[in-house]
Amino acid sequence: MSSNKPVSSGERVLSTRKIVISGVLAAIAILLGVTRLGFIPVPNASGNATIMHVPAIIGGIMEGPVVGGIIGTIFGIFSFLQATTPLFKDPLVAILPRIFIGITAFYAYAGLKKAKVNEYISLVVAGLVGTFTNTFLVLGMAVLRKYLTAQVALTVIVTNALFEAVVATIITVAVVAAWKRIETGTGKSKV
């Protein structure tokens, strides 16, 4: 059997490429967590801004919502397993919201591309959507589960969200543009 032959799973088709890319990007998210490179210390209630969600955004943009969802799920599970606070020891806070990071990034990107919006603008918006999905869903669930007050969550959004969104967007645009450049084999980006 050819390594590029898709493996059918019900109505979804997951190719060998998508499985490998999911694994590589999930490993990068885990590496960012284990080495603490994915956490940027900030002086607020959260203690850290994160870029650990970026691989899920990139996976969603490059390979679709299933891959984005897989990477987000693996990021969430890692966050849950490494948790040192009750907030992230709850799978409804640590895992569930992260499933949607790459999925929302994909649909934002795909929708803008279908509307013939510029590639760079589509990547910027997808990076922002993925980041805000992580921020709003995690903090929203933390408030619903009574780990944080709405005021504390709002403070974290104001102090972290913009910074995380800018950094995630820069990384997303740079990585996806480079990836597309490599895939075309021309040295010039399709972006």
Image (tube, helix red, strand yellow):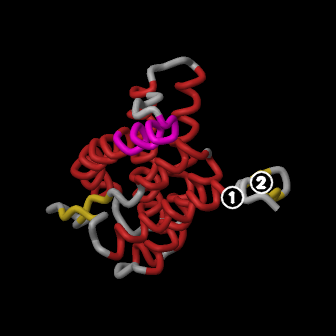
State yes or no: residue 181 in magenta: yes
In this figure, which residue is indicated by the disc labeled 1?
16
Q: CA distance from mark 1 to mark 2?
A: 6 Å
Q: Residue at x 17, y 61 (%)?
A: 42
Describe residue 131's horizontal placement relative to residue 14 as left or right. Answer: left
Q: Is residue 52 above or below residue 179?
A: below
Q: Residue at x 60, y 61 (%)?
A: 20
Q: Position of residue 72 (x, y in %)?
A: 52, 59
Disc 2: CA contacts within 10 A as few (<14), some (14-19) or many (>=20)? some
Say which amino acid is labelled 1.
Answer: Thr
Extreme residue toward the left, this view: 43
State yes or no: residue 146 in magenta: no
Splitting the image into 4 quarters, where does residue 150 fall?
bottom left
Q: Are marks 1 and 2 in contact (CB under 8 Å)?
A: yes
In this figure, which residue is indicated by the disc labeled 2?
6
The dominant secondary structure in magenta is helix
Near-viewer residue (147 or 24): 24
